[in-house]
Amino acid sequence: MPTLADIGEDNLIRRLMRGVKLDGDVIAGAGDDCAVVRSTKNEHTLLKTDALVQDVHFTLETPPKLIGRKAIARVVSDFAAMGGTPRHAMITLVAPPSMQVEFLTEIYRGMRAIAKQYGINIVGGETSRGLVLMLSVSMSGTVPSKRWLSRSEGKAGDILLVTGRLGGSIKGKHLKFEPRLEEGRWLSENAHPHAIMDISDGLAKDLPRLALASGTHYQVNVASLPCNPGCTFDQAWGDGEDYELLLAVNPRTLRSLMKKWHEAFPKLPLTIIGKLVPPGEGRPPDFESTGWDHFALSGDA
């Protein structure tokens, strides 16, 4: 019998969702950064949930305010990839009975601070006893009905770009990153990329996901990856938890996009890293080698 480690996260999700039926209100279900549900003529509702688990995404030596900050910021990053605006959050807290109350209080201080920064209401949640500390954040928000972004509309020939710099997140960025929310909304208004997603699991995992959703293969010039100081191209490719945006755009709009981007965000790089290509060319999406949750705090991955 296969285990989770054998099949990987993406194959598990496909198996679990097999046979799930959705009604006409659901525009996009599992497989994108957020689910998209009809709301009004001009606006759709975005839904997202995400979990932060002790010894996977943080340790008990991590400052608790930064644990809370990361729990909210990860979900905001998914809204950025849809061109949306997060509005309301519910928190599920699972903790061992031996956990110090002050540690948990500090986690919530971190969550409240970043929620205030992005105009998010923490409207409730749930608590439960468990063996390790875990935070699950469920969030809803909105996106203009004619401008929501997806990872599934990429076309062969599209140019691949990334925002910011990649690699070495374990040194601290995974706790202190700023979600590209403003940049995602700007892209939806000014460029509307064919495909876009946030880079949470690393390009080595997330680019194949985008290519699979778009029905394409891909080519990447690894030597062109924008690296954080002290990082190698391999780290930029595979480290993960970058929380930058990966996008695929029509090559005919590239020059205009780059000019307007540098005017709007002069301090944030937007770098060409490759392109989407037809099936049979370049690298195919390959989930057999991507594994489970690659970002190991022990540094073994």
Image (cartoon, rainbow, N blue to C red):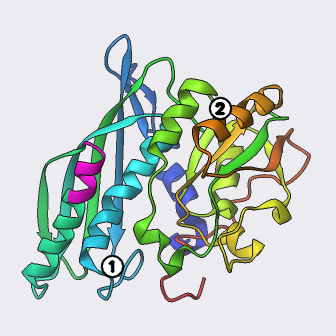
Q: Secondary structure at mark 1?
A: loop
Up-down: is 165 above or below 159? below
- Farthest residue toward the top? 41
Which disc is residue 201 wearing?
A: none
Q: Is residue 3 visible?
A: no
Q: Secondary structure at mark 2?
A: loop
Which disc is residue 193 wearing?
A: 2
Q: Position of residue 298 (x, y in %)?
A: 50, 89
Q: Quadrant of residue 137?
A: bottom left
Residue 116 lies in the magenta stretch = yes
Which disc is residue 54 wearing?
A: 1
Q: Position of residue 109 (x, y in %)?
A: 17, 66
Residue 59 lies in the magenta stretch = no
Q: Position of residue 57 (x, y in %)?
A: 41, 74
- Magenta residues span 113-119
Q: Is residue 166 visible?
A: yes
**Picture residue at 17% right of the left edge, 73% below the top:** 106
Say which of 301 and 263 sits in front.
Answer: 263
**Picture residue at 13% right of the left edge, 68% below the top:** 128
3D distance between C-alphas at marks 2 and 1: 35 Å
| Residue 202 appears left or right of 211 | left
Quarter occupied by the C terminus: bottom right
| Residue 174 appears left or right of 2 | left
Q: Position of residue 70 (x, y in %)?
A: 35, 65
| Callout 1 amino acid | Gln
Q: Quadrant of residue 149?
A: top right
